Amino acid sequence: MKITASAPGKLVLFGDHAAVYGKPCLVTAVDLRFSTTVEPLDEPVVEISTPQLREQGETYRVQRDAVSARNRRETAFVEAALRQLIDRYKVTSGFHVDTEGPQVTFGLGSSSAIAAATLVAAAQQLKLEIDKREIFDLVYAAVLDVQGTGSGVDVAAAVYGGTVYYVNRGDMIERLPDSHLPIVIGYSGSKVSTTNLIGDVARLRDRQPDFMHTLLHMLGDMSVQARDHILHENWQAFGDLMNIHQGILDGFGVNTLQLARLIFAAREAGATGAKISGAGGGDCMFALAVESTRSSVTEAIQQADGTPVDIATGADGVRLETTSHKA
Amino acid sequence: MKITASAPGKLVLFGDHAAVYGKPCLVTAVDLRFSTTVEPLDEPVVEISTPQLREQGETYRVQRDAVSARNRRETAFVEAALRQLIDRYKVTSGFHVDTEGPQVTFGLGSSSAIAAATLVAAAQQLKLEIDKREIFDLVYAAVLDVQGTGSGVDVAAAVYGGTVYYVNRGDMIERLPDSHLPIVIGYSGSKVSTTNLIGDVARLRDRQPDFMHTLLHMLGDMSVQARDHILHENWQAFGDLMNIHQGILDGFGVNTLQLARLIFAAREAGATGAKISGAGGGDCMFALAVESTRSSVTEAIQQADGTPVDIATGADGVRLETTSHKA
């Protein structure tokens, strides 16, 4: 019996970079799903097939007891998730694992989604009942096992879905009531290393500790208020905070001219607010555009050489797929 | 006997917009001088000739007792300065006043400079001995008479010259020891109304009082630290603060895409820091470029469709010109 689970990508709304320092942030899950299909194996072996490995004509096999985040880059998140499950539940069987993901992710993709889908599909295969919080804890542990560091906000989006208010490495994870976020996403067409950007901000914080402390704290406070503005659909205030937040990210040195072009274009076309999503240096911005300005903002992003990304926000968190095939 | 005085324009370095709220700021006088030549008249009349009026073939005459900031837009700062002097010193004579200024000012010009030059030339004509502080107070009063509002930082630059640390409407005015500022100025080629921009920031402050309070206060604190960094020639830290400051101004909504282009170009060419000078919405940015990067930064500004402005900073404050002609 094959079991498939899928998990969504993420768009960070507020608290980008501040989340690294444990500050509150807001993230929404995006309907760009990564899925993992797990079959049982009788041997104590794990076979992993990823899009990248399939392209290379390879299926990777590893002894169950040797499964580790550090074996191969291509399978690190899958192995890390299985490792958590194997250790926590003294798993004795083996697995065949197939992962799938969208070819184009606009920087909204998420290794956490792959880890979450893997963990949930394998747990279901083992008939384990695990609640969201435990899924989060295991997936976050897996992500830390691979990366060494990380706020866990992308794990929260992958596991809980919807729009999530998230504080300090999961101290608080609140999925907000479902509601439509009136945003337009624009892809800037390029990307630099998130790790480098986080390092740049850390070094600026070392050089300017007082100002950076205040600003990072402020981004956390903005997330707190932005949460309220979502709940009350107070979009003017939400947009004001987006713009101030964007300026602070620019001050951190993570803005780019191309992101700025999309942001200015969106505002000129009527967006109440516009900002980078995530670490910056490329990837996506998003604009707050109520229905009447939605098409003009979308067009403005296109005319500024951006790619409007028409992907639903507030997507479901990790879930079993009912389309699973019989073995 | 004709007497001529001249006063410099200004480039705000730190605390832009924050100065409006009384926060500390830093300004440097630029060698873009406005001059006023004053001759005595026997009648109780003031004749004023400005470049604009001369172009229209007009000399404007007004009874000395009717001199007012509110008579004409073209002569408002000249009349306001004379009004201060007439009232303070019970002046009984009349004046003929000629003003001159650079044709192209790159937004570095200053009505305060015209008022300062007028006041000093007229005072000299009356053989009054007035110290810098009183000149500042009278010129600032004149500027407020015209504008109704204003931080007075441009008055401080016009009167004191050099690089000035300035707090809360002149509560503290400190001319820093002369030193070379390693900066490159770039003109963005456009301008919107400073008054509108100050109003936009005020409205954002009304909507987001807590965050704006913190940010405006922070810009003041940055000015305090930037003053120290100038004194110790700590340019790395000065540049870091410029970049953070720029981000906060961007968050206030006073950045433009063209200013952003010049700022990103300057940084990519090696500038340690780059930011808007003044109210934003156009006008100038400046970049911190030590000698080794000076030419590459200048070129980068040009290639980003900006105009490098080769004008010396730390210029003399208001002064009598020795080239005065005999009547």
Image: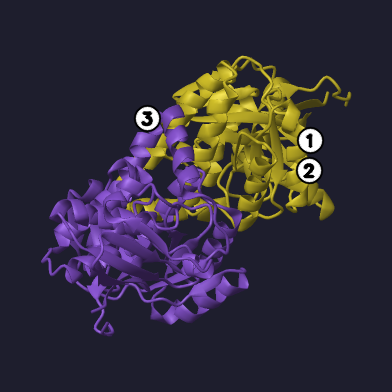
Chain colours: A purple, B yellow
Amino acid carrying label 3: it is Asp
> Which residue does the numbered mark 1 point to in the structure image?
B295
**Distance between the alpha carbons at the discs numbered 1 and 2:** 6 Å
Measured along the vertical axis of the image, is residue B270 above or below residue A243? above
Image location of residue B314, percent across then percent down: 68, 24
Q: Quadrant of the C terminus of chain A?
A: bottom left
Instruction: Tell me the chain of label 1.
Output: B
Out of B297 and B92, give the one closest to the viewer. B297
User: Mark 2 and mark 1 in contact (Cβ < 8 Å)?
Assistant: yes
| Quadrant in the picture for residue A27 | bottom left
Residue under pointer 2: B299
User: Is residue A15 shown above or below A319?
Assistant: above
Q: Is residue B241 left or right of residue A67?
A: right
Q: Nearer the viewer, residue B146 or B13?
A: B13
Q: Residue at x 38, y 54 (%)?
A: A76
Query: In x, y percent, where is residue A199?
Result: 46, 39
Q: Is residue A27 above or below residue A17?
A: below
CA–CA distance between discs 3 and 2? Answer: 34 Å
Where does residue A260 sit, x and y in percent of width and height?
56, 57
Q: Residue furthest right?
A: B326
Which amino acid type corresponds to the residue marked 2 in the rendered image?
A: Glu
Q: Chain of mark 3?
A: A
Compared to residue A158, the image places residue A192 above or below, namely above
Distance from Cα at disc 3 to Cα at disc 1: 33 Å
Tell me: B181 left or right of B327: left
The number of numbered badges drawn on the structure is 3
**Residue identifier under label 3:** A210
Residue found 50% across the figure and 71% down from its top: A104
Looking at the image, can residue B310 be seen?
Answer: no
Q: Amino acid at mark 1?
A: Ser
